[in-house]
């Protein structure tokens, strides 16, 4: 199993916002911190905003920030937003399923159960679980004045 680039960027973006709770972050700052292109990031930010994870602010002091606390953001829910429309296998697609075994195959129910278990395990993990008490992540993803202060201090675990 492999996650889409958008899911990966979404989690990086949310983690960046979580470790910068008192900041409104600009897209360029997040792109640099996360090592992604601003074009890809823009699409992800739009989806994260549309689904209620991020708040976007326009204007001179605009940018993005979390709309809800990190403890209220389930990793499983984020993954579903970005992965739900990507069929896991050909037989999962209602439109593009050309598998000659589909009518008799018992692999599909097993894969369904595995995916359910995968998402269920991620449902128990929150953004707060990933970012709280994680000084290494804070140092990697902090932006603005916080980043400058952290550059001067050593990372402790």
Image (cartoon, rainbow, N blue to C red):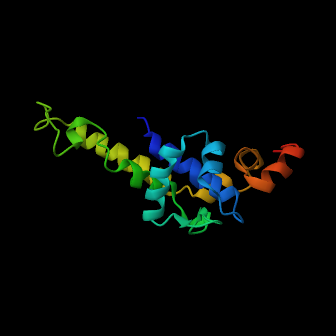
Up-down relation of residue 19 to residue 8 (above or below): below
Horizontal and vertical percent position of residue 21 = 69, 63
Q: Is residue 7 left or right of residue 102?
A: right
Residue 51, position in %: x, y?
A: 43, 64
The C terminus, quarter of image: top right
Report if residue 157 is visible in the image.
Answer: yes
Indicate left or right for 109 with 134 as reference.
Answer: left
Q: Is residue 24 above or below residue 31?
A: below
Q: In the image, what residue occupies the spot 72% across and 66% down?
A: 22
Q: Quadrant of residue 95?
A: top left
The image shows residue 68 at horizontal and vertical percentages of: 57, 69
- Report the quarter where the N terminus lies: top left
Identified at 62% across, 53% down, the residue is: 15
* Residue at 59%, 53% in the rendered image: 27
Residue under the point 54% across and 65% down: 56
Asked if one can make out residue 77 in the rendered structure from this viewpoint, the answer is no
Question: Residue 124 versus residue 14: which sits nearer the camera?
Answer: 14
Going by the picture, which residue comes out furthest to the top? Answer: 100
Q: From the viewer's side, name the closer residue of 109 and 45.
A: 45
Image location (x, y in percent) of residue 114: 36, 43
Residue 69 or residue 140, whichever sits in front: 140
- Count up the numbered dots: 0
Q: Please state if 89 lies on the left or on the right of 59 as rendered.
A: left
């Amino acid at each position: 199993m492999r996650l889409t680039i958008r899911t990966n960027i979404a989690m990086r973006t949310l983690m960046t916002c979580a470790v910068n709770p008192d900041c409104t972050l600009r897209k360029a700052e997040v792109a640099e911190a996360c090592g992604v292109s601003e074009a890809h990031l823009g699409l992800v930010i739009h989806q994260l905003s549309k689904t209620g994870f991020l708040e976007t602010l326009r204007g001179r002091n605009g940018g993005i920030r979390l709309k809800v606390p990190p403890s209220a953001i389930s990793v499983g829910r984020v993954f579903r937003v970005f992965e739900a429309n990507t069929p896991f296998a050909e037989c999962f697609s209602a439109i593009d399923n050309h598998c000659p075994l589909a009518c008799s195959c018992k692999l599909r129910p097993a894969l369904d159960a595995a995916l359910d278990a995968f998402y269920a395990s991620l449902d128990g993990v929150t953004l707060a679980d990933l970012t709280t008490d994680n000084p290494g992540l804070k140092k990697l993803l902090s932006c603005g004045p916080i980043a400058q202060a952290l550059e001067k201090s050593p990372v402790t675990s």
